[in-house]
Amino acid sequence: MSPLISLKGVNKYYGDYHALRDIDLTIDQGEFFSLLGPSGCGKTTLLRTIAGFESVSSGVVAIAGKDMAGVPANLRPTNMVFQSYAIFPHLSVAENVAFGLRKRSDLNKQAKTALVEDALDMVGLDGYGKRAAHALSGGQRQRVALARALILKPKVLLLDEPLSALDKKMREQMQVELMRLQRHVGITFILVTHDQEEALVMSDRIAVMFEGRIGQLADAETLYRRPRNRQVAAFIGKMNFLDATVEPAGDTYTVDVAGLGRVQIGADQVPEPVTAGPAFVGLRPETLDILFDDTAASAVIDGTVDEVVYYGDMTYYDVRIPGVEKPLNIAMKNAIGRPVLDVGAKARVGWDARSLVLLK
């Protein structure tokens, strides 16, 4: 893949409010890229600067090697699918999809009809062309919006929280369909979302944003397993944080961890260098086990169940251990014959030092 979009030193002010802060970013041709972060972090503003709906206060936005300064949204090689879908209810599905072709004098009616049919087939709406747009479900309206954007064959498709209005089951289905569609058309997709799971499932790379800055840019596995700081670790999935004191020693770190004792942590478990002194250790709930028998574990600590949340396929436990103020969150996959512990029960917690992440 080669860079298609380049942002250098991009800043955006709204009066005194600094919405984007020194953004440096490249996005590759054919990449499924996500901008992820809490409300107000700047992700939608960044998407709109790429689209041309917002001008930058300073810096450069380039697409396909061309500086986009002064280039209006309608002349950029991008198209956007909005959160609201912006479907025209008084038009048919086919008329909605063909809307962007209305000024294409180089295409006759037959050619436009063929392009509409191809676009509808691409998004799984073959045969829906004559249906009234107001009679569609939420998922179908989303597909119409995608077809209308893709029919113009943009270099970049911009997606502003396109799945947020769908129910959980439909949202999960559309995540898979969007991935397949992106691979099929080979167009660069840039998704804005506040949903961590959505970004992790679909993206080649993810930029996690906080307060107008990129906190970390990486692939999904790196973000989840090796977040670079506590802010990213807390936002991506669930994470237990334990106070620690660090003694660097060559390629390893000797760390006194609250509740766990003294452990050795390798350099591959330290996303950013940590100096001697106070720090944090993070460990994901699924890396901890509640041992119901003599199952082997690298290390075991005894605790007491403080809370139980049963989800059918998973049970989440809060377990209090000596020396730690907050209970550990533990995720256990339910299996036939495995009991679900009650609040107040004693629990043997198995853990492995290799699953720890050392954070500044």
Image: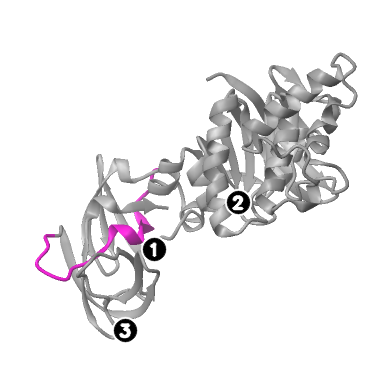
How far, Cα to Cα, is label 1 from label 2?
A: 20 Å
Q: Earlier in the sequence, mark 3 or mark 1?
A: 1
Q: Amino acid at mark 1?
A: Phe
Q: Residue at x 30, y 54 (%)?
A: 356
**Front position in the image: 46 or 326:** 46
Which span is picked out in magenta?
272-296
Q: List the residue tagged with mark 3.
A: 343
Q: List the residue tagged with mark 1.
A: 241
Image vertical order of residue 152 relative to residue 315, above or below: above
- Figure quadrant of residue 238: bottom left
**Front position in the image: 100 or 345:** 100
Q: List the residue tagged with mark 2.
A: 37
Element carrying mark 1: strand
How far, Cα to Cα, is label 3 from label 2?
A: 34 Å
How far, Cα to Cα, is label 3 from label 1?
A: 22 Å
Image vertical order of residue 114 relative to residue 134, above or below: above
Tell me if residue 329 can be seen.
no
